[in-house]
């Protein structure tokens, strides 16, 4: 989603376009979420002996121009109408959001189309069709945002340094090209890319780098990885030119840490790619043992708190050791406690996947049984100093990093009981509904729709609540997206039992937000009458703990001004852990959904 730092002129342009267009019945029926929108490259020729060519595909707010206009969305299936040929051509596409830069599309075949929606619906791919590879696969690799902006890097799951063997199955020979584990692979110094240095191979020494675009679990249960070759365009005149994008399968072997990796022949995920062990190119990666931790770490007799033990989003805590993947610096850190926790502060020794070492101070707080937060001080030391965490006020602290527990102990009910509706402040022609699943109180839904036509849905989201806590007048709730991968935090204010204000607080529960000024007002329309525990109760504000919406930033409103200044961030190049920075506040999803279409008309 776009940052909220969008000018008033752009917002006015969007609203004007939406007003002028949506009064035409049937013209505003179906939209693509902003996560889907962008400019993509897709392979246009699938042939082992042909030059690989690419086609540009743009996904706009309400259309994919080369395939048609968005008519109806049914879960991951979308009906597109193409009238460019003079007659209606209706097709069903299955869209699966795999990562920020990868969209996997399945279709019966672009050469087929139908003249009515009912016929096209019969051809919508099912998960079984996709699993059995009975549909046409179209891999879309995002190259820029729809506005032409460059993309953010993505962390690479091939983490650390490895020795490797390498084999290419091109039919020219039966022997393995690099049979000895003298070649290496590492995602150092950039955790969003890796470099293979091949040595003692039948073709001589060779080096190759790839940027990671995302990894995911496929419909078949296997792990996939999308790669970009940054040198492919420069080598376009070679014979044959290398593919710009590659698809791979990989498997991490538990216990040994070894990784089996296979790459496809081209930019598809099906051409000569069958498993992590069988592909056009196959690699076996054996991890290089990390540096021995500092003596202070090996001699320490301590453990991280019992409540923190286990698997979290990007954090794993086991005894006296934790492993954290920092998606901002694109590094993975191992941290060892040096002393027992005192008032939530723990001195630690850290080591990155590239071997960078440091001593620093860690703060950990349990927010609920399924939510924790931690802070790392960027004031790192090269040698351990007794009393490292004894004066926390003298240290610089990075923002809190919020983490949801993967191995959850118990479900956490959402603090929303019933149905609430409101008008989006920055787009008053758009309304929103927030409502709970009365039979599953940990689930809540959010829908953006036209205030003039409730059936005209702009955006739909589904959340699982993981836990909530309060700080002063602000209550935060941390959630997991169920309609796609990801986590989000909300903050807010309760005015009465029937009136709340909510805001989006990013992925790390950003502090200093003003929900009453910048949040979205929601008014209760109906309680959960079928569940006595969820029925409305007299509102009595507790002394310190308020419901999550008390200070929650609505993800669909303008940016709030922060009342809490950020601490100065020091250089972490010496090996300190760099937690994720707060996510910018976002402008309305409904507004974003129509941004590109209408601004081109009304700018």
Image (tube, helix red, strand yellow):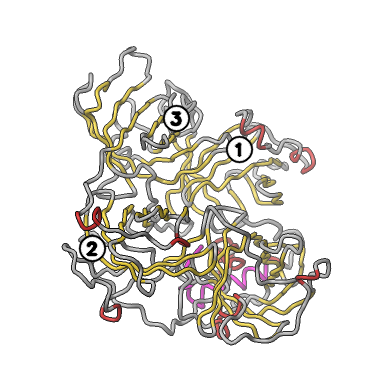
> Whole-Å distance between the Cαs marked 3 and 2?
38 Å
5 lies above or below 544: above
* Residue 249 against residue 304 in the figure, above or below: above
Neighbour tally class for label 3: few under 14, some 14-19, many 20 plus, Cα within 10 Å: many
Q: Quadrant of residue 186?
A: top left
Q: Give neighbour class at mark 1: few <14, some 14-19, many 20+ (Cα, 10 Å).
A: many
Counting residues from the N terminus, which is met first, the one under dot 3 or under dot 1? Answer: 1
Q: Is residue 553 visible?
A: no
Find out whether residue 13 is within the magenta segment: yes
| C-beta proximity under 8 Å, tags 3 and 2 | no
Q: Residue at 32% of width from left, 73% of height from top?
A: 397
User: Is residue 252 toward the left or the right of residue 439 in the image?
Assistant: left
Residue in the image at 23% along x and 51% along y: 293
Q: Residues within 10 Å of mark 2 (few under 14, many from 20)?
A: many
**Residue 385 position within the rendered picture, expressed as x and y whole percent measured from the top left:** 18, 68
**Direction left: furthest residue:** 383
Task: Name the element at disc 3.
Answer: loop
Residue 159: mark in rendering: none
The one nearer the camera, 162 or 25, is 162
Q: Residue tagged by mark 2? A: 359
Which is in the foreground here, disc 3 or disc 1? Answer: 3
What residue is pinned by disc 1?
106
Total labels: the figure holds: 3
Viewer-side label of 1, 2: 2
Residue stretch in magenta = 1-21
Main secondary structure along the magenta-highlighted residues: helix
Q: Is residue 585 magenta?
A: no
Image location (x, y in percent) of residue 36: 55, 53
User: Residue beneath label 3, please?
Assistant: 276
- Position of residue 525 measured from the top left corner of the image (x, y, whole percent): 78, 76
> How far is disc 3 from disc 1 in space, using C-alphas?
22 Å
Does any portion of residue 355 appear in the rendered image? yes
């Amino acid at each position: 989603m776009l940052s909220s730092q969008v000018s008033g002129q752009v917002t006015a342009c969007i609203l004007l376009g939406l007003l002028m267009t949506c009064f035409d019945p049937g013209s505003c029926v179906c939209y693509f979420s902003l996560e889907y929108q962008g400019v993509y490259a897709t392979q246009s020729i699938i042939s082992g002996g042909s030059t690989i060519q690419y086609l540009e595909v743009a996904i706009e707010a309400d259309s994919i121009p080369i395939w048609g206009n968005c008519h109806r969305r049914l879960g991951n299936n979308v009906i597109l109408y193409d009238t460019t040929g003079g007659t209606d051509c209706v097709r069903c596409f299955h869209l699966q959001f795999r990562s920020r830069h990868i969209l996997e599309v399945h279709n019966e075949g672009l050469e087929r189309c139908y003249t009515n929606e009912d016929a096209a619906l019969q051809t919508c791919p099912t998960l079984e069709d996709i699993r059995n590879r009975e549909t046409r696969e179209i891999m879309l690799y995002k190259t820029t945002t729809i506005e032409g902006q460059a993309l953010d890097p993505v962390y690479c799951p091939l983490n650390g340094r490895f020795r490797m063997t390498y084999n290419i199955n091109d039919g020219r020979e039966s022997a393995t090209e690099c049979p000895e584990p003298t070649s290496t692979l590492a995602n150092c110094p950039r955790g969003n890319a890796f470099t293979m240095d091949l040595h003692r191979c039948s073709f001589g020494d060779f080096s190759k780098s790839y940027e990671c675009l995302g990894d995911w679990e496929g419909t078949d249960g296997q792990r996939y990885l999308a790669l970009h070759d940054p040198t492919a365009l420069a080598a376009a005149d070679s014979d044959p030119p290398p593919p710009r994008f590659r698809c791979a399968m990989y498997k991490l072997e538990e216990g040994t840490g070894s990784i089996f990796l296979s790459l496809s022949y081209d930019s598809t995920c099906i051409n000569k790619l069958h498993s992590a062990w069988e592909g056009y190119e196959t690699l076996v990666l054996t991890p290089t043992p990390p540096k021995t931790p500092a003596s202070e770490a090996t001699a320490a007799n301590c453990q991280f708190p019992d409540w923190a033990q286990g698997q979290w989003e990007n954090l794993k805590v086991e005894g006296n050791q934790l492993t954290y993947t920092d998606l901002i610096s694109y590094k993975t850190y191992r941290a060892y406690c040096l002393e027992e926790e005192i008032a939530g502060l723990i001195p630690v020794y850290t080591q990155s996947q590239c071997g960078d070492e440091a001593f620093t101070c860690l703060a950990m707080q349990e927010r609920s049984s399924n939510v924790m937060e931690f802070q790392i001080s960027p004031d790192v030391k090269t040698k351990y100093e007794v009393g490292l965490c004894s004066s926390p006020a003298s240290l610089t602290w990075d923002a809190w990093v919020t983490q949801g527990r993967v191995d959850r102990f118990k479900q956490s009910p959402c603090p929303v009981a019933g149905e609430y509706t409101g008008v989006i402040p920055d787009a008053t022609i758009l309304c929103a509904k927030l409502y709970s699943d009365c039979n599953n109180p940990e689930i809540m839904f959010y829908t953006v729709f036209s205030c003039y036509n409730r059936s005209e849905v702009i955006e739909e989201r589904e959340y699982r609540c993981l836990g909530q806590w309060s700080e002063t007048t602000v209550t935060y709730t941390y959630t997991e997206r169920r309609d796609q991968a990801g986590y989000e935090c909300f903050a807010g204010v309760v005015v009465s039992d029937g009136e709340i204000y909510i805001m989006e607080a990013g992925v790390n529960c950003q502090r200093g937000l003003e929900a009453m000024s910048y949040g979205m007002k929601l008014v209760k329309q109906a309680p959960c009458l079928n569940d006595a525990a969820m029925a409305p109760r007299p509102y009595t504000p507790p002394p310190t703990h308020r419901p999550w919406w008390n200070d929650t930033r609505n993800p669909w409103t303008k940016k709030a001004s922060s009342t809490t200044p950020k601490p100065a961030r020091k250089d972490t190049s010496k090996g300190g852990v760099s937690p994720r920075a707060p996510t910018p506040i976002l402008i309305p999803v409904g507004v974003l959904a129509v941004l590109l279409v209408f601004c081109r008309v009304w700018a």
